[in-house]
Image: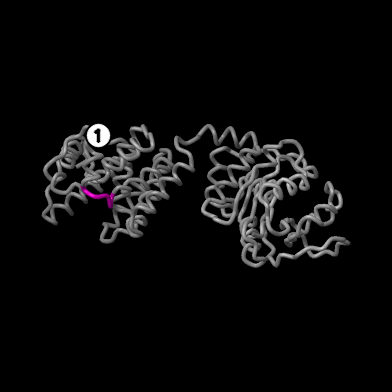
């Protein structure tokens, strides 16, 4: 087995790192890449903003699903200054590679390589794999190496840190799971940014929202997932307009149909725990209770207790009396999101102009009229909601 060692701060890991590893696997025919995050490089000053554990967690997130990439935290466990020769000796002993280890470095390190501890021994024990990073220069480099024919990526960890610190675009430079960790932990931000971000901190982490979205994508058909995505985006937009936590709206939207394709028995088994009655329409078509099932799934399997979130997911199909603002928003988004055809365009314009109670009442009435034209009976929840809206003078 041919093993290449890829060490560095990975502060943060980005798409350039991942692409380089893929090139070594494909073009240089290595079988395994061992990513080794440094505890502290001897030739670099410590960079504030991310702990060794943060950097390790970002690597773990970035490499999820990569079967030929492994992470070894030996330098973090050793602590202190991270010398490459110590790591090479350690990896040789533990991994028992049949051939010389490859060592991935950037050509910007060639000029300082002689300063590395036991540089000559490193060059003897490894096959140096040199990636192009710096502009073409001629170095008097005395050791043999293999050049990696890589494109010049316009990305670096330092640039990403700088972009984050100055509130510039950066999320396109790292895997989404890495971006989630950076956002959730407020990494690389100034003290002022940190205070501002934390003051409006959301209830659920980006990682949790990503998890629920991954589940929705794997459980739902592509068309149903796209509907859920559209509901999530429109819910977030409406939440932003009405000054509600937009990530809460996005989470409710992405999760509202998560049990849509469950079998009737599975849905009935879950909804029995919410304590609500099951009317004759729901008994005849248990799939209509997929919203109730989704709410109970989040509560029972993910420990979610946020009442507004659970209500929004539970009530998105039929509505009902005493709906909170988030529940009204998800109901609206579910009924008129852009992929739905034959929707009254006035309702979509009202999303930008009407007060929430008025917009909600308009969407409910439009939905009721559609159901009546289809000859469908109204559930007890929808009937109670209509009565409430009439009493409030909205219908």
Please state which of residues 269 and 343 is positioned toward the viewer in this rendering: 269
Give above or below for 27 relative to 245: below
Q: Is residue 48 visible?
A: yes
Q: Which residues are magenta?
A: 260-264
Compare residues 196 and 49 and report the one nearer the observer. Answer: 49
At label 1, counting other C-alpha atoms closer than 10 Å, the crowd grade (few under 14, some 14-19, many 20 or more) is few
Q: Is residue 124 left or right of residue 52?
A: right
Report the label total.
1
Q: Is residue 104 visible?
A: no
Q: Nearer the viewer, residue 192 or 83?
A: 83
Q: In the rendered image, which quarter contains the C terminus? A: top left
Residue 108 in which image quadrant: bottom right
- Membership of 11 in magenta stretch: no
Tag 1 residue: 274
Give the side of residue 302 with respect to residue 138, left or right: left
- Seen in the picture, residue 322 relative to 225 is either above or below; the reply is above
| Residue 252, quarter of picture | top left
In the rendered image, residue 261 lying in the magenta stretch gets the answer yes
328 left or right of 72 in image: left
Quarter in which the N terminus is drawn: bottom right
- Give the x, y percent position of residue 58: 59, 45
Location of residue 70 in the rendering, given as x and y in whole percent from the top left corner: 60, 51
Return the x and y of residue 71 as percentages of the image width and height: 61, 48
The dominant secondary structure in magenta is loop
Q: Position of residue 380 (x, y in %)?
A: 14, 40
Q: Residue at x 16, y 49 (%)?
A: 285
- Give the residue drawn at x 40%, y 50%: 233
């Amino acid at each position: 087995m041919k093993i290449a060692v890829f060490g560095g701060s990975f502060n943060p890991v980005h798409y350039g790192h991942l692409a380089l590893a893929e090139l070594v696997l494909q073009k240089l025919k290595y079988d395994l890449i061992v990513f080794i995050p440094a505890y502290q490089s001897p030739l670099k000053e410590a960079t504030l903003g991310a702990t060794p554990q943060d950097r390790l967690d970002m690597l773990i997130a970035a490499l999820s699903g990569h079967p030929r990439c492994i992470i070894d935290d030996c330098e973090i466990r050793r602590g202190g200054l991270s010398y490459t020769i110590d790591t090479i000796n350690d990896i040789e002993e533990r991994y028992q590679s049949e051939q010389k280890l490859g060592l991935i470095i950037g050509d910007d390190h060639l000029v300082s390589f002689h300063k590395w501890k036991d540089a000559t021994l490193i060059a003897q024990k490894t096959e140096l794999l040199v990636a192009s990073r710096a502009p073409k220069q001629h170095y008097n480099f005395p050791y043999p190496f293999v050049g990696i024919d890589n494109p010049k990526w316009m990305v670096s960890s330092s640039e990403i840190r700088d972009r984050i610190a100055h509130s510039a675009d950066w999320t396109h430079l790292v895997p989404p799971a890495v971006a989630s960790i950076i956002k959730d932990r407020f990494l690389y931000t100034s003290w002022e940014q940190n205070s501002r971000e934390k003051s409006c901190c959301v209830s659920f982490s980006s990682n949790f929202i990503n998890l629920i979205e991954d589940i929705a994508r794997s459980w739902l058909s592509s068309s149903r997932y796209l509907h859920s995505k559209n509901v999530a985006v429109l819910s977030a937009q409406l939440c932003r307009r009405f000054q509600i936590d937009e990530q809460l709206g996005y989470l409710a939207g992405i999760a509202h149909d998560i049990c849509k394709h469950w079998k009737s028995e599975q849905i009935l088994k879950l909804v029995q725990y919410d304590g609500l009655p099951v009317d004759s329409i729901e008994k005849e078509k248990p799939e209509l209770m997929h919203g109730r099932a989704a709410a109970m799934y989040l509560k029972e399997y993910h420990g979610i207790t946020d009442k507004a979130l659970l209500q929004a997911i539970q009530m998105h199909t039929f509505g009902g009396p005493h709906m909170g603002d988030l529940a009204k928003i998800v109901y609206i988004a579910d009924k008129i999101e852009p992929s739905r055809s034959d929707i009254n365009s006035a309702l979509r314009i009202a999303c930008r102009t009407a007060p929430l109670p008025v917009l909600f009442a308009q969407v409910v009435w439009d939905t009721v009229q559609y159901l009546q034209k289809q000859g469908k009976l109204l559930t007890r929840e929808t009937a109670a909601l209509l009565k409430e809206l009439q009493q409030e003078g909205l219908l």
